[in-house]
Amino acid sequence: ILDALSKGLDGIGIALNSTTDLAALLKGVYIDAIALNLHGEVSTDTLKQLDQLIEEKAIAPDSIRGLIDFSPLTTSSKMGEGRDPDNLAEIISIYGDKYTHLKLIHIDARIVKNAGGNESQEIAFALSQLNEYIDQLTKQGIDISVVLENIAFSFSFGTSYFLEIAKIRAFRF
């Protein structure tokens, strides 16, 4: 990781498993100077490890940016089973205000394209997941603005350059 960062990389993506030790993995990394994207087997323990690391390094929590992928709907779309979405409201209420530049929900629309879908299906999938997250989390007392502030999207990009630009512009509209 340090070698890649020393060559100009300004962010890292790490696939975690249940035994990942964040402190050991990020030793020597200035996590407040990069985009930190954690996905895979992300749990509340991941955030507790991150909290401890930030406290040890005396870093301001609002200087941490990136994504920690708590995404029960995307996980269930990929694997057929997912994490407990009820836990997501608790995670957002605890960590959403603390880590203002760290997204906690990731809607990965790339799985639609990778499964043979087209651009409009990819957008429809992202919007349907967004709607479901808004519905579930607002029912649990999370304000809609907090939900929207904690969501990041990923889309695939193919070789049809202008079509892909149109897809993103249509989504942003």
Image (spheres, rainbow, N blue to C red):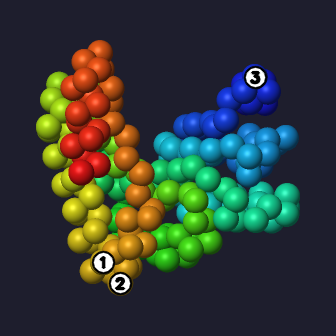
Q: Is residue 16 left or right of residue 165?
A: right
Q: Decide: is 43 above or below 118.
A: below
Amino acid type assigned to the residue bearing label 3 in the image: Lys
Q: Single out the mark in the foreground, 2 or 3.
A: 3
Rate crowding at label 2 as few (under 14), some (14 to 19) or many (20 or more) other CA atoms within 10 Å: few
| Front-most of residues 171 and 140 | 171
Q: Measuring from the top left, give residue 164's x and y in whole percent.
A: 27, 28
Amino acid type assigned to the residue bearing label 2 in the image: Gly
Q: Decide: is 153 above or below 163.
A: below
Q: CA distance from mark 2 to mark 1?
A: 5 Å
Which numbered disc covers residue 106?
none
Circles 3 and 1: CB atoms closer than 8 Å: no
Quadrant of the rendered image containing residue 163 = top left
Query: Can you say which quadrant of the picture contains the N terminus?
Result: top right
Q: How many marks?
A: 3
Q: Decide: is 38 above or below 73.
A: above
Q: Secondary structure at mark 1?
A: helix
Instruction: State the residue at coordinates (72%, 27%).
Output: 8
Circles 2 and 1: CB atoms closer than 8 Å: yes
Q: Which residue is mark 1?
A: 138
Q: Which residue is mark 3?
A: 7
